[in-house]
Image: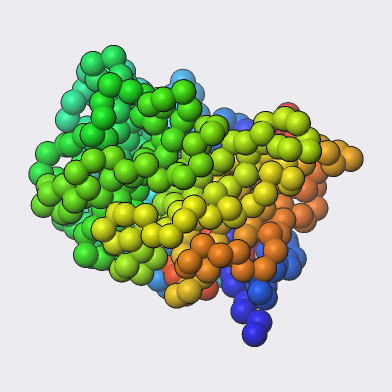
Amino acid sequence: MLKTTQIIIAVLTASIITSIAFAYFSLENGQSESISQIITINSMSGKIDHADIAVSPSGKSVMVWHDKISKNYEIFSQSFDEDGNSSGFPSIVNHCKIYDKKKPNIAMDGDGNFVVVWQSWEQDGNEGGIYGQRFLANGGRNGGEFKINTYILGNQGNPVVAMNNQGNFIVVWEGKKNNYKNIYAQRFNADGNKVGKEFGVNKTINKIQNNPSVSIDNNNNIVVVWQSQRNSNWDIYSRKFGWNEEIISIADIIVNGTTSFDQTSPVITIMGQNKFMVIWENISQHEILDNMLENLNGQVLTNAGQKSGNEIEITTPIFGHQENPDIVQVAYNELLIVWQNYEKLAYTPNWHIFGQSLTTSGIPNGDLFMISTNGIEAKNWNQNPAISSNGSGNIKTAWVNSDKEKNEIYLTK
């Protein structure tokens, strides 16, 4: 059965002109074909970077990024209609204009209302702080800019946000306290009010924790994953929380079964109301190539936050370095992951964006396919993909495309 899926791909630029390419993707048994046409969006200064994107149930989408204006970096957003056409012009998200703002992350509820979070340097009075802004589905601001972190000493950064259909959301970030970097979180209800206090996610606090990812279901069950170096290698950990400050997972749960080498860069997505899927980079010693390569492994978690079944090898190291994965549920029984892949043994070694369809059991559905295949972008470095979906066939993903002198943002539909 042929299933046609709209995919929007955004690629960031460090040049004055940001290009947005549109392409149609048809997925049949996990395979992809595409065509594209290109429109352009002007960058303010040529320092644009770090895109993220969210999709509403109707198929409308909002993309966010940071860009430099005059002396400071600001957070920008751009809305797109169901056909991928831009709605209006890019607008500045943050209200405070006197400090650098970077690394935006976006989440959306079932009505198309959304929230954007980012890190802001020295705005909270001590190094980095975490801030946010809520928006209505029509793009209008819903209240003012707000500070998320309570503890302000040391640097708070790398925020991620997840929102359920009701509009409740959870923000998770890295924060340094007592000489160790740990993972912290704050719940918010649909009215934008804090639910409970800021809390520490990881149980073990005397080690390094970073790279968090979070997911929340419509019953307000929250699962956070992150990487931690507690022995000689990095491993992936998870912990589940309820909505009213209850802790479901008493201890940090190690997600990966492979522990011989580093496990890094975890991402998580909800699968209906019963399961979560975690994907991460598995660094291993390749038997034939005799060097260290990354492949992508996965693990299904139950609604209780416990491991279900064995660790899954999603890709194999023979395809080269596979890094920075992201994942989303695109249909009732289907997931889609994207990542950057470096083909070291290719005639022209390069970074490309690949995709792979999975069942909700984590089993690959068809072969992996290259996304960055159209026009000049296939010749450049394509990195740092992000992906979002409304769960019923409309998928949008973003990545950074660079020709080593400039970057570009491509948007496909």
Q: Position of residue 337 (x, y in %)?
A: 56, 56
Left/right placement of residue 133 relative to residue 313 reads left
Q: Quadrant of residue 98?
A: top left
**Residue found at x 69% / y 44%:** 317
Residue, far top: 179
Left/right placement of residue 360 relative to residue 83 reads left
Q: Quadrant of residue 117?
A: top left
Q: Position of residue 333 (x, y in %)?
A: 48, 74
Residue 191 vertical position relative to residue 202 in the rendered view, above or below: below
Left/right placement of residue 24 relative to residue 247 reads right
Res. 32 in view: yes
Left/right placement of residue 36 relative to residue 231 reads right
Residue 11 vertical position relative to residue 301 in the rendered view, above or below: above
**Residue found at x 26% / y 58%:** 304
**Residue found at x 36% / y 63%:** 275
Q: Position of residue 105 (x, y in %)?
A: 40, 44
Q: Quadrant of the C terminus?
A: bottom right
Q: Quadrant of the N terminus?
A: bottom right
Q: How is the image coloured?
A: rainbow
Q: Nearer the viewer, residue 375 or 264?
A: 264
Res. 383 in view: no
**Residue found at x 28% / y 45%:** 239
How many marks on residues? Answer: 0
Q: Nearer the viewer, residue 350 or 231?
A: 231
Q: Nearer the viewer, residue 189 or 277?
A: 277
Residue, far right: 347
Q: Position of residue 64 (x, y in %)?
A: 46, 46
Residue, far bottom: 1
